[in-house]
Image (spheres, rainbow, N blue to C red):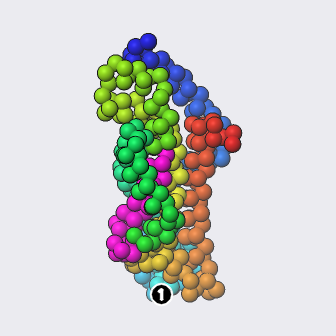
Amino acid sequence: MTTAVLTTLGRIRSAGAGSGKLRALRKNRLAMTGGVIAAVFVLVALFAPLVAPYDPARPDFADALAAPGWSHWLGTDDLGRDQLSRVVYGARASMQVGVVAVALAFLVGVPLGLLAGYYGKFTDSVVSRLTDTMLAFPFLVLAVGLAAVLGPSLTNATIAIGISQIPAVIRITRAETLRLRHVDYVAAAVANGGGDATVLFRHILPNATSALTVQATVGIPAAIIGEALLSFLGLGVQPPEASLGVMLSGAQSFLAPAPWMAVFPGLAVVAATLAFNLLGDGLRDVLDPRGATR
């Protein structure tokens, strides 16, 4: 059976399976709920200047510590800044870090995982040892350490979180490459003279996208929590810029007189991470039936 025939059959099966998977995902109410909430966060992040009713950095001392009401739906902080506007811009920072950090992790981790899984031997040994070394440190500990070395800023926090997620991406990509390198269409491509680049990027990588998509939906909430933690510790977004972590840090001294200063940014962090986790669980159940039955 030639490579062309195998590829054609694979595309036909993929098209049929794809429509079935989409229907299965639609039936998963938790996944769809998570997807809707995640979409809302993405839209709020994209259109933050239009959504926010006030300038998030503009103080109004006459309105400091105002309780939630018609003028300020989520109240104000100790400087009179509108909490809703700051939550909106904080969500924007979280989404920015989540997407960019995961993209950075994939940009580095996917090629390394492909090389390790496909070539094996010395390449696999080097990449695996590097991955194991990084995995010896918990994700948040590694991110905090890297951010402390790079210096406090949103850009450096994004880089630190992205680097911390590289080992997980390498392991997923390597495992998928090891599984796919022995399937029929890959063997046929090799037998018909297909080069390494053709095999890796036309046959293996496209068929590994399901696992990588699930990993992305898991990586984004981890990055959101990482950004909130780094900003809370003063290693991420710097005041007066808005961040959910910065808001939680500033609320520590006002938990009794103004609990809304901590409640609303905390709920935003919980909602964003829960939404992407629910979406990721749904995608995993649909795209990886083996994982759903464990």
Residue 37: image location, x then y, percent:
56, 52
Q: Is residue 265 left or right of residue 153?
A: right
At 35% from the left and 34% from the top, the residue drawn is 201
Residue 257: image location, x then y, percent:
62, 86
- Of all residues shown, which one is farthest toward the front? 121
Report the magenta residues as a range: 147-173
- The kind of residue tagged 1 is Ala
Foreground residue among 168 and 122: 122
- Give the SS element for disc 1: helix
- Tell me the quarter of the picture where residue 290 sits: top right
Residue indicated by mark 1: 62
At 43% from the left and 72% from the top, the residue drawn is 145
Residue 159 in view here: yes
Callout 1: 10 Å neighbours few (<14), some, many (20+)?
Answer: few
Foreground residue among 181 and 142: 181
Residue 53 in view here: no
- Tell me the quarter of the picture where residue 48 sits: bottom left
Residue 206: image location, x then y, percent:
42, 33
| Magenta span contains residue 168 | yes
Residue 287: image location, x then y, percent:
57, 36
**Split into 4 quadrants, where in the image is the N terminus?**
top left
